[in-house]
Amino acid sequence: MKVTVFGIGYVGLVQAAVLADAGHHVCCVDIDPDKIAGLKKGVIPIYEPGLEALVLKGTREGRLVFTTDAAMGVGHGQLQFIAVGTPPDEDGSADLKYVLAVAETIARHMAGRKVIINKSTVPVGTADKVSAKVAAVLAERGESLPYAVVSNPEFLKEGAAVSDCQKPDRIVIGTSDSEAEKAMRELYAPFNRNHDKVIVMDVRSAELTKYAANCMLATKISFMNEIANLAELLGADIEAVRKGIGSDPRIGYHFIYPGCGYGGSCFPKDVQALVRTAQQVGYEPALLQSVEDVNYRQKQKLFQFINRHFKGELEGKTIALWGLAFKPNTDDMREASSRVLMEALWAAGAKVQAFDPEAMDETIRIYGQRSDLKLVSTLEEALAGADALAICTEWQPFRAPDFERIKASLSEPVIFDGRNLYEPAALKAQGFTYYAIGRGD
Ligand code: UGA
């Protein structure tokens, strides 16, 4: 099928590359000329396992093209994906200006029937707004061309985006238009082989499904973080509790790992956006607000441990930091816990010596060169001459380090672990002071 994707960010690029790999002809449109020029030369703007190979293959085989020419994009696809960003407004609600600008562009240039698909995470009611925008522009043009607006939320995880997209758990299609449904089923047929993963529903339910999924996952994490904080005060071990409750299949083992808070481009933004949506319709979402509040507090946790350990005397101290990305296998630092920690350490006069396998360039892009931040190229280098080690991301190489070396490098053998990577008893036996989340100290 012929498909156009507007917005070649995370979701758009992965979706386009995976659709092209499945045999569709995909035209990618973005307003950023540098990004498009780079992609034409095979420069992938994000780090995502498996993505580069797919983009290069699609380009080589002529099924994936990149352009800034919106008219060409509209002309190409019978299916038009909108995958542009919806950054939070000052009040936390999702800003729809980019989504509506694409809707307008499609309406300006379309010459025949189009299925317009919202792939961006957008508040309930956005499909209706997109539809109204298209209708208004067509009316302005004096045209009455047929179109349908479909909600087709994306559920991929960063770091596993390509495989999530190729092997989706479910394909949610929000539409009441039978022709659009047929086209969407045909588009996803290559990913829907073993059992039917397509769930068709009305457009508003599809929009809410996306928020409900992310908010449920964020709720699980904040719930566990709250119980972890309680475990600390009650002398219990959250890791035992986690195993104890996860064994109940109604609860399950997924997404109940306590830590120094959730980050990323999705959970914080989506929880806040659903809170705003609820308030706009006169509902006070007490649980969602608490999910957000608990997470805000949780991100301060490592700093509180460090500050307490050093009795508030952080001036001149150097903290080694392992992990900058908001989670492993990505270079993304949006809403990362590491940022809250570093900024608190700097404000208290401490220095940070940091290592991350992928997010070093991103750190420089965000913070620039600063005298209180030294980025180093190995985990060992981060330790050299530091007073303590803090861990914000559970990258695989951090899981089994050389503890003797850590001890020898630090001025004091103390570890502040925001991801519960080690066994407290084993570390204590080796002479460390070990702070973790919900495991006593
Ligand atoms: C999340 C969802 O998991 C995807 O299903 C969804 O499609 C995506 O948002 C989106 O809306 O685009 P992602 O943001 O890539 O995906 O990251 P996750 O793997 O969900 O992790 C989010 C944060 O939660 C990370 O900071 C992670 O460290 C934290 N987390 C996760 C925990 O603290 N504990 C857990 O048990 C799991």
Image: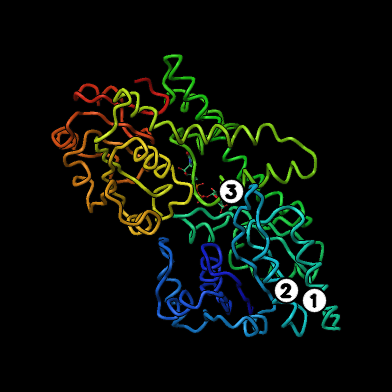
Residue 269's disc is 3
Q: Residue at x 18, y 36 (%)?
A: 406
Q: Residue at x 79, y 61 (%)?
A: 128
The residue labelled by disc 2 is 104
**Spot occupied by residue 116 in the image (x, y as percentages of width and height):** 72, 70
Numbered disc 3: secondary structure:
helix
The answer for how far apart the CA atoms under marks 3 and 1 are is 30 Å
Numbered disc 1: secondary structure:
helix
Of mark 2 and mark 3, the one earlier in the sequence is 2
Amino acid found under the numbered disc labelled 2: Glu
Which is more toward the observer, 379 or 90?
90
Quadrant of the snapshot with the C terminus:
top left
Which is more toward the observer, 89 or 51?
89
Of mark 3 and mark 1, the one earlier in the sequence is 1
Q: How many marks?
A: 3
- Left or right, 440 with respect to 82, comes to left
Is the Cβ of the residue at disc 2 closer than 8 Å to that at disc 3? no
Quadrant of the snapshot with the N terminus:
bottom right
Looking at the image, can residue 301 be seen?
Answer: yes
Is the Cβ of the residue at disc 1 closer than 8 Å to that at disc 2? yes
Residue 137's disc is 1
Which is more toward the observer, 39 or 178?
39
**Spot occupied by residue 123 in the image (x, y as percentages of width and height):** 70, 53
Instruction: Please say if 182 is above or below 27.
Output: above
The answer for how far apart the CA atoms under marks 1 and 2 are is 7 Å
How crowded is the residue under tag 1: few (<14 C-alpha within 10 Å), some, or many (20+)?
Answer: some
